[in-house]
Image: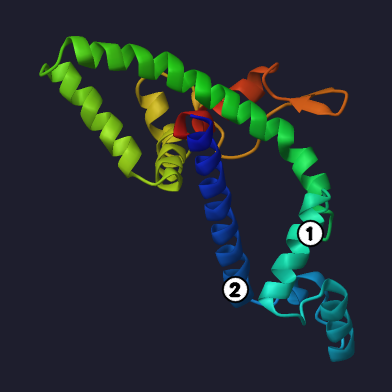
Amino acid sequence: MLAFVVSRLVQAMAVMLAVSFLCFALFNFVGDPVNNMVGQEASPADREEMRRALGLEDSVAVQFARFLGNAVQGNFGKSYRLARPVSDLIVERMPATLELVAVAALLALFMGIPLGVLTALRRGSLGSGAVMTFSLAGVAMPTFVIGILLIYVFSVECKNWAPAIGLPGSWCFPSFGRGETVKFGWWSSGLVTAAGLKAIVLPAFTL
């Protein structure tokens, strides 16, 4: 059993390294990050100096090895778009990410388990078929497509159909953001406010 777990962990690490390297290599074909970090008035000499400072003149393999070495020490470099340390951005966005994952997991448990039991007990029924069809559609569709559809129906078009069925326009869900948040030390939570709870519904249901 231990050997099986170890082998699976090694395989997982190998896959993660391969995917990381592939993404790292493909990033070199999506444009020059220096263009996002300097203004249009920057001279070619300034651009070259920036490239040298970021180590972009090295080969992809050398850049990736340097990234791994720094990542092991907790240094993930700077965001090319925001020009801020990536570790700071991760900490800053960690509360929103963990809250979204937690709410999505709770939704999956409280919806998935009862519906799974219902499907097993009433196999072949119309309700069981509907649940299976809905589940397969959800698994087959990319997450971003589901998210866009939910935004379109419950954020954009909601302003038209909600009043038609007697619901106020304020019933519609926001299409972005976390709503109102409350600070608890370094942690910011949207789960303790009505606007924050409303804002997390569509993203959590999408996941």
Q: Upstream in the sequence, badge 2 or badge 1? A: 2
Q: Secondary structure at mark 2?
A: loop
State whether residue 52 appears in this view: yes
Disc 1 marks which amino acid? Gly
For image coordinates 72% across by 26% down, the residue present is: 180
Name which residue type carries label 2. Answer: Val
Q: Compared with residue 136, is residue 59 higher up or lower down, i.e. above or below?
A: below
Q: Residues within 10 Å of mark 1 (few under 14, many from 20)?
A: few
Residue at which label 1 appears:
69
Say if 186 sits above or below 33 in the image.
above
Image quadrant in which you'd find residue 82: bottom right
- Residue 38 point in image, percent of width and height: 83, 74
- Image side of residue 130 versus residue 96, left or right: left
- In what element is the residue under mark 1? helix
Residue at the spot of label 2: 30
Is the residue marked by circle 2 packed among few (<14), some (14-19), or many (20+) residues within 10 Å?
few
Most distant residue in the bottom direction: 44
